[in-house]
Amino acid sequence: MIIILSTTGFFPSGYAEDMTASAKPDGALHGGAEMLLAARGQKYTTARRAIVSALAATGHPATIAELLGAAPGLPASTAYRNMTVLSEAGIVIRIGGTDEFARFELSEELSGQHHHHIVCTDCGLVLDTSSSPGLEDALAEAVRGVVQAGGFEITGHRLELVGRCTSCQ
Ligand SMILES: [Zn+2]
Ligand SMILES: [Zn+2]
């Protein structure tokens, strides 16, 4: 088990016990994305909207190749640049996997869903896993005792479970 402490990305509003039921309606998702981009002087273009829709539909952290497959109208030539813009605006976050492919998902700020990840050490598949109030409380308690370097103000956590997926077992 790897626990990555981070200074961003903790939004206590969403425990994501039922991730589909708590998912934001499309309108709220796109409205939120548009506002975050506008705050950086960026436009919510058709391609950026297509990426956000594809990420919302995929249901797990996706590679650029997966997104291009899910959104056939998305121009591959601009996908990487748009992903960078979306990432800088806090709409998308990059998930570090165990293979060479970067995976992306909607930020918790945008989705309102605090959750954790399960990573396959063989093929690199990353799946979302829900948290629970009990687990969140236990982690918060455990983190209080962590000897930390760098004088960080801890504002959240990213929890990653590693193992082998059903295809790799
Ligand atoms: Zn696997
Ligand atoms: Zn958590």
Image: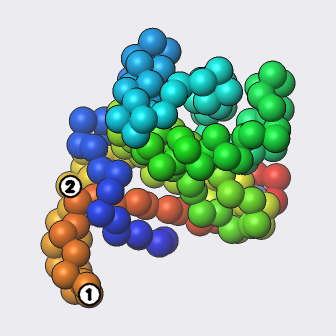
Q: Is residue 20 above or below residue 133?
A: above
Query: Image quarter for residue 146?
Result: bottom left
Q: Is residue 152 above or below residue 104?
A: below
- Give x and y (percent) for residue 73: 81, 22
Which residue in the structure is indicated by mark 2?
A: 137
- Secondary structure beneath disc 2? helix
Q: How is the image coloured?
A: rainbow
Which of discs 1 and 2 lies nearer the camera? The answer is 1
Using a 10 Å C-alpha cutoff, classify the residue at mark 1 as few (fewer than 14 neighbours), some (14 to 19) or many (20 or more).
Answer: few
- Where is residue 41 drawn, in percent x and y? 42, 35
Question: In terms of image quadrants, where is residue 34?
Answer: top left
- The amino acid type found where label 2 is placed reads Asp
Q: Is mark 2 within 8 Å of ligand 2?
A: no
Circle 2 packing at 10 Å, graded few (<14), some (14-19), many (20+), is few
- Please name the amino acid that badge 1 sits on: Ala
Tell me the residue at 47%/39% (across/down): 91
Classify mark 1 as within 8 Å of ligand 2 or not, answering yes or no: no
Residue 157 x, y percent position in the rendering: 33, 61
Quarter holding the C terminus is: bottom right
Q: Is residue 108 visible?
A: yes
User: Foreground residue, 77 or 154?
Assistant: 77
Compare marks 1 and 2 and give the one earlier in the sequence. 2
Residue pictured at 40% horizontal, 60% vertical = 158
Residue at 49% x, 15% y is 26
Q: SS at mark 1?
A: loop
Location of mark 1 (residue): 149
Vertical relation: 87 (above or below) 5: above
Gap between marks 1 and 2, in whole Å? 22 Å
